Structure formats: structure tokens, C-alpha cells
Image (cartoon, rainbow, N blue to C red):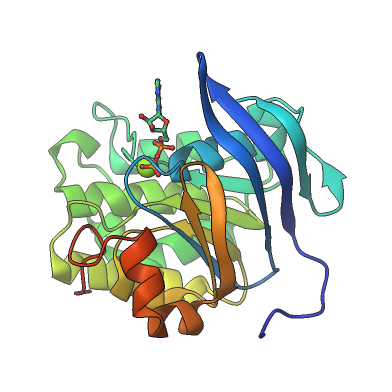
């Protein structure tokens, strides 16, 4: 096992969550080690997005505990969780189409956000500097994804929750996004939801696999990458776990 003997930055223990009457998360347990990339994998509908939304407090945890940096956040409101230094890049990106790139980024900045973080976001995605005055709605899907990631980067976040950044993007853009996340790896802790196994392999140290709202695997990404039986069983080989970055 390569699990480091340090306190996790984030830990979920016995987390249950409902959407309406549906029991979506059915006792989720896993930990995210600091300054590493943990990938959350699983089929469509496994509960990956709901897990991120529950960490943020957007979906209430019905029971269990969510601990961030030693503090129980499972009952906190989303804006409190965010203020603790948790950045979110949602699955559908949610950029403000009518605002410019620069306006999107400025709106995302919390009080005290540093110039260094602003510079870092633009160094990782130089396209955003060039397109600062362009309406976000007129950007390509890949450029909108860069805006969505940059919005999380302009704040001094300690944990980034990134939901399927490769979804619907051309391979060349997936490679660019992978490179940007690789560049901040080691200084920012990332919990990444991905169905693109190659991207997960390129970035992740640790893997968590969800199935039907339960964790069915936690361990090194390298071990999961080598275990075809596990992949076939929980990720659907030849299905959504596409092979190219
Ligand atoms: N707003 C919603 N209303 C009802 N059911 C939902 C809603 N959002 C998600 N679900 C259900 O919750 C389950 C988990 O969804 P989700 O967390 O989005 O999965 P994943 O991100 O792994 O694809 C699915 O069965 C999905 O149909
Ligand atoms: Mg999802």
C-alpha cells in the first residue's frame, strides 16, 4: 500500500445522502491525502457527482461525518465550506455566458484572493489572458472548461473538487487540461471525478471506486490500472472508461 502515514485532508465516514426519496449515497467511506490527486471513478449514476455535492453541502449528508482539515463540515452551509478553501469545478461548468472571461474570474474571487493565484491561473491557461474580454458564452467547450478550472484556481484553495473535466472535450484539449492539473499537483490537493481512465492514470496517486452509492475499492491508482477484472466489474470495460487522453 502506498497510502501515506499522514492525516488526510478530507475524510468521509459512513456518509448517507438522499435526493428526494432516493437513497443515493449509502455509507460512503474514503480519505483524501494532502497534496495528492485522488480520483473518484465509477459508472454513470454511481454517485460521484452527488459525493462532491455532499462534501460541499449542496446535498445534505443525512448521516455520517465529513472532516476537512480536522474540522467536521458535514452540517455546514456551502458558502462556509467554500470559505474554508474548497474549490469546485462542476460537471456542467456553469460559466456565466453573458459575462466576459475576466468578469467570470473576478466574480469568483473571494476577499483576499492573491495576485499570485490570478497569475498562476493565467500562466496555466494563457488562452484566458488573450480572451479576457470575450464573452464566456462564445468560447468553445474546452475554453469554457479552462474558465471553470481557473475560477477555482484564483482563490487560495486547499482542496479542489473537479467533476469530469474531460467530458465532451477533444483529445487535444483533454491533454491541455491534464497538463494544467498536473502542474498544480503537489501544491493543491485534488479530488478528481473522471471516467477517462487514461487521464485518471496520468494524474492520480490514489483511486476510489463507487458503485451504487458505495465504495467498492480504495487503493493506489497503479493497482487499479493493472486490475482489468476490477475495471470490467465496476467501470464497464469498453464503455465509458475511454482509453485516450
Ligand atoms: N436531481 C436529481 N433528482 C433525482 N435523482 C438524481 C438527481 N441527481 C442525481 N440523481 C440520481 O442519483 C444517482 C447518482 O447520480 P450522480 O451522483 O449524478 O452519479 P454520477 O456522477 O456517478 O454519474 C443516479 O441514480 C441519479 O439518477
Ligand atoms: Mg456525475
Name the image quarter holding residue 203: bottom left
Instruction: Say which quadrant the C terminus sits in.
Output: bottom left
The picture places residue 97, in percent across and down from the top left corner, at: 24, 30
Residue 131 in view, yes or no: no
Residue 153 appears left or right of 238: right
In the displayed orientation, state which residue is furthest to the top.
20
The picture places residue 207, in percent across and down from the top left corner, at: 52, 69
Which residue is found at the position 50% from the left and 49% from the top?
Answer: 152
Q: Nearer the viewer, residue 187 or 200?
A: 200
The picture places residue 157, in percent across and down from the top left corner, at: 63, 53
Does 209 sit above or below residue 49? below
Number of marks in the rendered image: 0
Q: Nearer the viewer, residue 144 or 239?
A: 239
Residue 229 appears left or right of 216: left
The picture places residue 144, in percent across and down from the top left corner, at: 25, 46
Residue 92 appears left or right of 28: left
Instruction: Say which quadrant the N terminus sits in.
Output: bottom right
Which residue is found at the position 73% from the left and 53% from the top?
Answer: 11
Which residue is found at the position 54% from the left and 58% from the top?
Answer: 216
User: Ligand 1 falls in which quarter?
Assistant: top left
In the displayed orientation, state which residue is furthest to the right.
70
Residue 65 appears left or right of 199: right
Which residue is found at the position 72% from the left and 55% from the top?
Answer: 10
Does 47 sit above or below residue 204? above
Residue 40 in view, yes or no: yes
Amino acid at each position: 500500500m502506498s497510502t501515506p502515514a499522514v492525516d488526510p485532508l478530507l475524510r468521509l465516514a459512513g456518509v448517507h445522502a438522499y435526493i428526494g426519496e432516493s437513497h443515493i449515497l449509502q455509507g460512503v467511506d474514503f480519505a483524501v491525502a494532502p497534496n495528492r490527486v485522488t480520483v473518484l471513478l465509477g459508472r454513470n449514476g454511481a454517485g460521484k457527482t452527488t459525493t462532491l455535492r455532499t462534501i460541499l453541502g449542496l446535498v445534505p449528508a443525512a448521516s455520517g461525518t465529513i472532516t476537512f482539515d480536522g474540522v467536521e463540515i458535514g452540517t455546514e452551509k456551502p458558502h462556509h465550506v467554500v470559505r474554508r478553501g474548497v474549490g469546485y469545478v462542476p460537471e456542467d461548468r456553469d460559466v456565466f455566458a453573458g459575462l466576459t472571461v475576466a468578469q467570470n474570474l473576478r466574480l469568483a474571487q473571494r476577499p483576499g484572493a492573491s495576485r499570485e493565484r490570478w497569475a498562476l491561473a493565467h500562466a496555466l491557461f494563457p488562452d484566458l489572458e488573450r480572451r479576457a474580454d470575450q464573452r464566456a458564452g462564445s468560447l468553445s467547450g474546452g475554453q469554457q472548461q479552462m474558465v471553470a478550472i481557473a475560477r477555482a484556481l484564483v482563490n487560495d484553495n486547499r482542496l479542489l473538487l473537479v467533476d469530469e473535466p474531460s467530458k465532451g472535450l477533444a483529445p487535444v484539449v483533454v491533454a491541455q487540461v491534464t497538463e494544467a492539473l498536473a502542474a498544480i499537483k503537489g501544491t493543491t490537493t485534488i479530488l478528481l471525478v473522471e471516467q477517462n481512465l487514461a487521464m485518471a492514470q496520468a494524474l492520480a496517486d490514489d483511486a476510489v471506486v463507487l458503485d451504487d452509492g458505495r465504495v467498492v475499492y480504495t487503493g493506489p491508482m497503479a493497482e487499479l490500472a493493472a486490475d482489468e477484472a476490477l475495471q470490467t466489474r465496476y467501470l464497464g470495460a469498453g464503455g465509458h472508461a475511454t482509453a485516450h487522453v
